[in-house]
Image (cartoon, coloured by chain):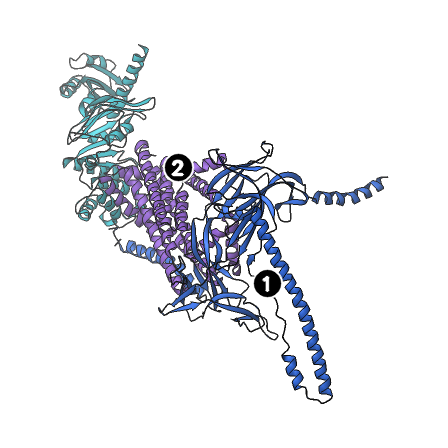
Amino acid sequence: MKASIRSGLVIGWRQLFESLLSPGFYIMLSVGLALGSVLVAGFTGSIGSSGFDPQASPLYDLISRSLSGAFGSTFVEKLFAEGPFLFALVAAFLPVSVYLAIASVFRFAQERSAGAVELLVYGPADGTSYILAAFLKDLILSAVSLAFIAAAFAVEAALTNLLLGPLFLWALAALFLLSASFFAYGLLCSIVVVSSSSAIALFLGISLVFSLVFAGSFTIVGAPVRTLSSTAAAFLSWISPFFYAGMIFRGVQAGSQGAVLAGLLLLAFLSALLVLAGRLIIDAKGVRA
Amino acid sequence: MIRTRGLVKRYGAFTAVNGIDLNIPRGEIYGFLGPNGAGKTSTIMMLLGITPPTAGEIHLFGERYSPRRLDLRRRIGVVPEKHPRGVWHWMSAAEYLRLFADIFEVPRPNERIGMLLEKVDLAAFQKRRIRDFSRGMLQKLSIIRALLADPDILFLDEPISGLDPLGIKQVRDLILSENREGRTIFISSHQLSEMEKICDRVAIISRGRLIAEDAMERILSRISSDREIRVELETVPAALPARVKGLPFVRDAAAEGTVLTVKIPREGDFRKPLAEFLISQGLVALSLAEKALSLEEAFITITQENVVELAERGRE
Amino acid sequence: MRKAFAVLLLVAAPLSLARADVPVRTEQLIYSVIAFNGRDYTPTFAPESSRAIYLLAGADSFISLRKTLVYFWPLTGRLQTDTQTLNEQLDGTLEVRDRRGRVFRSISLQRYTFFNVRGEYEQNWKVAVDADAEREYQRYLSLYRSFMKSIDDYTRANTEYLAKLKEMSDRIESLKASGRDVRALQEKMSSVPRPRQPDEPADYVVPPAPLQQAFVVNLPPGQYRVRLINPDGSIMEGSDKRIICTTPRRSGSVGYQVIPSDKWTRPEESKTPSAVIYVNGSADLYVSVFFQDELNDLAYQKTLDNAARGNPNVFSWVRIQQVPHASLRMSGADGTASVLDERPFTVQQSQGSSLGYTIVPYDPQGGQKSPDLMAFRVPVSTGTRLIRLSAVDNGGKPLPESGRQIRIVSPEVPSLVFALLAIIPLAAMIVVLAMRRRYSRQGTTPQAE
């Protein structure tokens, strides 16, 4: 195995161990699960004699009104068609993924400033090893979190007789790859700027822009409009993980497995591209802060 | 072992390293000196493969070296000036060493770690977390980390900085011990008194250029071709310096208080004839000692000469 | 003087505010649209500010250009037209150009009507133009007049019948009072034939609309530009508009309407093919099956109402018509299967002081002329966990995407269970940290192998 990759695996394993010793991961997972469980419980409480009635629950009344106002009632209907778990999954995974991303951004920049990366690179490792280590660590923790959340939801589904349908499984895959893209963006931010606070600010800024562009493109409109901002948004879409998530959603809507797989592959490709970009930049800039 | 030819490093319009040729044979303790901003760090970074040179070549173990030669990097152990603060603090000493042992693919790592910890008297602390280590313990840990893969070359950057006298002695002994086992040692430090004690050869770099590279003795002799002998007398007659100057082996003589300073050639030992002369003058020498030439003086002299030379070149 | 001025101001101020509430009407050239949306025809209009008209491709829709007054009505938050004040329909030819600007079609004004003929399927829309339209409308009018005459005749006959019954009843009473035998008279009374209420003409589900003039537009899918060419050949200024014609992404899928027996006025629809019908098991379900098409949400909403908003990234399932002669296959979690037939039902108000109603099978001999609903009765109880449904046509062929699950949800799961699941990571954290601490203290730190 190539030395840098091998070293990356060794370093990544240690980073994973360190993360598992950190309370933050468990706390965020608990927070996410609590949020998801509240949503599941609220859903079961909203079931009437003819079906799901959001107005029967204040929480779901608020959620459905807000989402309908932004994305239309059809979107809300599709979101809860199979049950609460799709929405609950996103809500449960969000705290964990945000924590993992920001912690990685902070840690990478901090270790680079402290000279840890340089120390590792004195040996048979290079910038690629360190990027790979951080990325793999986040992927594994993300997968573990999703698996745990899925298991918890499976228990809740069994207890309440709700269904974990095929859409839920697609969503697991999509969220995993979506988070991978954001982890890659985070690493890129840590590489581009030196200080950890600047890296976090840059990462949050990028995430916010992508979120706004996506939300803007997915909201209900009076008519399709072409303006300078929508043109800029169209360009940004190609580098936004949410664009490919939207592609997956549209594929699921259309019942097209091909479109869904294409979206998943493109998400994976985007992540790989970002990691490669990070590697090129760190090779050019050097590992010294 | 390490050889460079015409090594150059430029950062934009600024040339940090301007055509350095180094030659570090196997088994030497090689000192690398230079004032602040001389280009030391840039040179070391290139030798370690952290940054690529703008021009020139580096040969390591007889092979052309570049940052991509991770296989050659296995044979180098590096002890940086500072241990990264706040990183890996959750690890115990043994875990910390095991991380690097795994990166270097050290065979029978636990055995090797145990042996090295014993060597530096840290075996009792192997389960202690790094964050609880003192500065000296961290430095020793850093050194044995660099020794894990049994490297052919050990790079040390300010290895005794911040250590107490006992720590300094321990590190010095360790370096000398490793050198006796055949390891080539490359040290960069501002602690010139220590460098003088352990280095076989030194290189002095100033303003991006290598201005001296030679065995320690020859570097020291560049300060002066004379030796200086200080004689403390009960009394120093006024005419004594002139009389001493008249001796065939004396280059110069001067008196200050009760101390007579005599300059004699480096070749030959003229302390006995001098002592006999003083006795013949009816004088009693309370002490007679040769003033040691110091690397610090050599360093300052050489670098100042270089500054003057560059200034004159500039005027021309 | 000052006092008088202040009084005048106090009086005038509310008046000025009242004047400010009156919406400002502006004369505009609008496109009046009666568009087919897959189920029926809905009217809407596109004011000057609207960039596009949305139509369903391959279906007749009716467009006319008018000059009218348009104003914003704050109560509804929408633009309205004041056709009572001004409603001038413009003459000319509607020129339709494709994306390349080439003239695709030129459409002239035509008299038209549209109607839905009763048949096996709910949707039997027909459009007639010019002479055919006139003919169809006249046919409807004659049917209507005939029916109204039948109503008049029935009313007269019924009045006579009731009068006769009253007369006979009075006679029976008086004979009873005088102690005479009234049986024969009672028999005679019960044999008096009751006039039969005339049936409404069954030809139409939706009768022909009164004849009007418009451009009958039926375009293939795509985007077009339209404008009005005046009779003199000039282009009507301000008449340039886009027309966007869309088709369903998918057609012929099957959705379900679910009516619980305890809330029949609040049916739910299950349209997404992968949807699950979650119920609490407190009431039986009355299910009907319909065909549906999948249309772009924005395009569909704007076909219904040009001022509506929609999500261009989402596709909605739109109910088209009930599936005729379908059967429902039902199977439980234990695999037992049965076939349900669609039956008529009526809703009966509960008797006495209790509120509510019950759904019962329709009795043609009962007082109700027609059933309240045609549906499949799916028995549900809290003991049931899962019911699988799938619809088949009258040939026994499964209908596409008609599989659904009905799951009876157990909401009584204690919240403690959910809380425990959420706490598991924290418990794991405590265990991990404790183990680490113990090993560190004991000096047997686990290696990260």
Position of residue A85 measured from the top left corner of the image (x, y, whole percent): 41, 56
* Residue A31 visible from this viewpoint: no
Camera-nearest label, 2 or 1: 1
Marked residue chain, label 2: A
Residue found farthest to the bottom: C179
Q: Nearer the viewer, residue C347 or A190?
A: C347
- Do the residues at pointers 2 and 1 share their chain? no
Marked residue chain, label 1: C
Residue type, label 2: Ser
- In the rendered image, what is the letter of the chain coloured cyan? B
User: Quadrant of the rendered structure where residue B271 is?
Assistant: top left
- In the rendered image, what is the letter of the chain coloured purple? A
Write down the residue under mark 1: C200
* Residue B133 visible from this viewpoint: yes
The Cα atoms of the two marked residues, 2 and 1, are separated by 82 Å
- In the rendered image, what is the letter of the chain coloured blue? C
Position of residue C96 measured from the top left corner of the image (x, y, whole percent): 51, 37
Q: Nearer the viewer, residue C372 or A146?
A: C372
Q: Nearer the viewer, residue B109 or C43?
A: C43
**For residue B196, above or below residue C439:** above
Write down the residue under mark 2: A195
Q: Which mark is residue B93?
A: none
